[in-house]
Image (cartoon, rainbow, N blue to C red):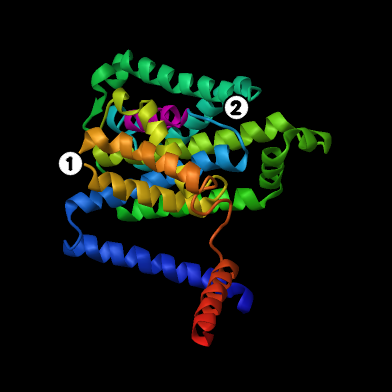
Amino acid sequence: MKKNLPIVFVCVLLFALFAVVQVGLSSGFISSYWETNIYLIGINIILAASLNLINGITGEFSLGHAGFMAVGAFAGGVITLNLGLPFLLAIAVGMLAAALAGLLVGLPTLRLRGDYLAIATLGFGEIVRVIMMNIDYVGGAAGLMGIPAVVNWPIIFISVVFTILLIRNFICSSHGRSCLALRENDTAAQMMGINITYYKVMAFVIGAALAGLAGVLYAHYYTIIQPKEFNFLLTFDILVMVMVGGLGSLTGSVVGAVLITVASAFLQSIPELRMVIYAALLIASAVFRPQGLLGTKEVSMNLLRKWGGVLNGSDGSKQAQ
């Protein structure tokens, strides 16, 4: 019974979060502005967690997430708007298209390392944006308009939970352990018989597919998408979320996405300073907390007990003094 307590605790917490937000939205207590930001937080959590799988768990350095998101967004938009097919099919096609793009990009580029991989994936994102701007079927530079607005809070919530569970289960699997070994020392991992290219591409494809999911959700909430939205600045935003939360920490991705999205909401009145403040946050994080807020740690019952013990110990020492 005690072994199931953490699972029960998490389920109760998730249900409470879902219920509170749903009641707030239904009653009008949460304004439309903050409703948009709540949905955006969910989309950003998916983006940050999927990029963390590539950059933090596997140890690569990809800057192509905006491109994968664009592929998913436009593929999903074509399914529902141009073809009039169901939204669930749009999710499947968007994720599949982004995964295929991840496979096509990952096979040749994941043999590169460090800055070379970053430049190659950044180039991919720009190529996708330029291609979309020149395809009339997806609206060209004007993009797609009138996409069905079918995304709501339950869909966002389920998508976020699905993403977290998928990545968490992957990390805890033998495949995930192999990716962690690659992050620590890919030469040693190769000597142990781990197929480096196979596991790098696997993580890359999963991360790309989840970015495609975020793109589909984005398109079907805002109903209008343009190629110019998916530029390198979007990838930079996602990277800041990952870096602030902690490379290699799934919990950190959630924390980073929430903090950066909320900060962005408060900075809407001064958009010209937003990137300056983001850069300052990234510099401060690199100087004072280079591993991010959580580093590679995950919030668990054991960690909460440890923190509780530290706090109790400090309180006890103060009382003794």
Q: Which residue is mark 2?
A: 114
Q: Secondary structure at mark 1?
A: loop
Nearer to me, 317 or 239: 317
Q: Left or right? Give the position of 135 relative to 125.
A: left
Vertical arrangement, residue 299 with respect to residue 244, above or below = below
Vertical arrangement, residue 243 with respect to residue 154, above or below = above
Vertical arrangement, residue 246 with respect to residue 114, above or below = below
Residue 72, magenta (yes or no): yes
Nearer to me, 149 or 49: 49
Callout 2 crowding tier (Cα within 10 Å): few <14, some 14–19, many ≥20: few
Amino acid bearing label 1: Ser
Q: Position of residue 78 (x, y in %)?
A: 33, 28
Residue at 73%, 34% in the rendered image: 186
Determine which quarter of the picture holds residue 91: top left
* Alpha-carbon span between mark 1 and mark 2: 36 Å
Residue at 41%, 32% in the rendered image: 235
Residue at 29%, 44% in the rendered image: 264
Q: Position of residue 73 (x, y in %)?
A: 36, 32
Q: Left or right? Give the position of 113 relative to 125.
A: right
Could you tell me if residue 249 is visible in this image? yes
Give the farthest residue toward the bottom.
320
Residue 269's disc is 1
Q: Position of residue 267 (x, y in %)?
A: 24, 43
Q: Secondary structure at mark 2?
A: loop
Amino acid bearing label 2: Gly
Report the magenta residues as a range. Answer: 64-78
Q: Position of residue 219 (x, y in %)?
A: 31, 36
Nearer to me, 252 or 173: 252
